[in-house]
Amino acid sequence: MNKSALFHQFVAFTATIHQVTHDLTQNITAANITPLQYKILEYIKVSQPVTPTEISECQHMSLPNTSRELRKLQEQQLIQKFSDTADRRKQYVRLSKEGEKMMEEAFACIEERFLQLIQHATQDDLKDIQHALAILEEKVLRQNG
Amino acid sequence: MNKSALFHQFVAFTATIHQVTHDLTQNITAANITPLQYKILEYIKVSQPVTPTEISECQHMSLPNTSRELRKLQEQQLIQKFSDTADRRKQYVRLSKEGEKMMEEAFACIEERFLQLIQHATQDDLKDIQHALAILEEKVLRQNG
DNA sequence: CTCATTACTTATCATTTGATAACAAAATAA
DNA sequence: TTATTTTGTTATCAAATGATAAGTAATGAG
């Protein structure tokens, strides 16, 4: 099999994934949130509690800039910070009640849009999709990342 | 089958795809190019010739901003513009010779990194991967476009 | 021909994001 | 104890990106 052809197929596929992600997530938050701040909230939502250092690494941004964005999110009452009792340098970040509410609404909206994408899929189609996702996770994506 | 579970699997999958894309494409261009300009060049590379309006729509940016970035790319001799002979309002954008060279090097670098991702895949694995990509394209991504 | 529309440009301003220096507090190593 | 490292903050500055007003030239509709 031609690995180069597979590469081109993969590139086209990822381009489409990015496009679909854009469509699924556009105009999600009514709140006064920048795209970067939304990504940070998304990460906190699925990984909380997280430290600023972890956010910094996962979002590929410097710690000072992470600190600034977290301060803005805290000013908007969307997150809360706690100090580690053992190591008081460390901070743990969680969504506040309002933050949770906002992100749950966002995820619900995205899910609704996703369900429209697969509205015509049969049970067999769904099994095929699930299997395809698992194959790619296992045989391409889980190698390094 | 539980569609909601499939949604969560899909979300995790796209997050990983974005991470892998980031890893594959980081530090690609030595040239003095911003991320947005790189995306524009990538789009021109695979779709040329394209009009500023098409770039504008595909990259979700306004025509004035598109025009500004294209001017910068032209100043760096990475693209060329041609007028449509039939409709002289229209412009067609192409990569210049230097632009082609740059993008081919970039793609070669990305391909090399991709091949490392699948270096341990057997022939059967490659067939599975190709099939999985095709399934997802067909049953999820091609619905709305 | 006149008017509206389309495709694009230029100019300008605001916002977002990135980069870096300097600092403080806590923990750890020597 | 002293020195070093880790974790995070504040403050600036620069660059990238977004938004919008105004204008030009070509086209097409009436």
Image: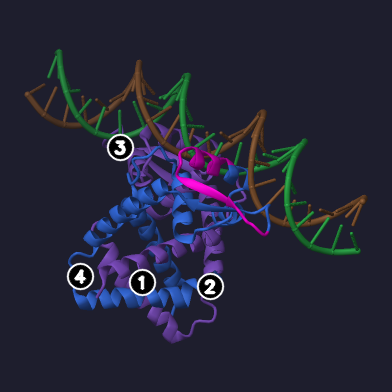
Chain colours: A purple, B blue, C brown, D green
Say few, some or many: other residues with alpha carbon within 10 Å of mark 4 (under 14 / 14 to 19 / 20 or more).
some
Q: Is residue A74 above or below residue A125?
A: above
From the image, tell me which residue sits under label 3.
A85
Q: Sequence order check: which comes first, mark 2 or mark 3?
A: 3
Which amino acid type corresponds to the residue marked 3 in the rendered image? Thr
Residue at numbered disc 4: B121
Say the numbered circle drawn on residue A117.
Answer: 2
Q: How many neighbours does mark 2 have within 10 angstroms: few (below 14), some (14-19), or many (20 or more)?
A: some
Disc 3 residue crowd, few under 14, some 14–19, many 20+, Cα 10 Å = few
Which type of secondary structure does the marked residue at label 2 adopt?
helix
Q: Measured along the vertical axis of the image, is residue B110 above or below residue D14?
A: below
Say whether marks 4 and 2 touch (CB < 8 Å): no
Evaluate whether label 2 is on the same chain as label 3.
yes
- Can you tell which quarter of the image residue B131 is in? bottom left
Q: Residue at x 36, y 43 (%)?
A: A60
Q: Is residue B85 magenta?
A: yes
Q: Which amino acid type corresponds to the residue marked 4 in the rendered image?
A: Ala
Confirm whether circles 4 and 3 share one chain: no
Q: What kind of element bears circle 3?
A: loop
Question: Nearest the camera: A90 or A64?
Answer: A64
Point 22% across, 59% down: residue: B116
Residue A77, by quadrant, is top right
Contact flag, marks 2 and 1 (Cβ < 8 Å): no
Q: Residue at x 57, y 40 (%)?
A: B68
The part of the chain drawn in magenta is: B68-86
Is the residue at mark 3 from the same chain as the one at mark 1? Answer: yes
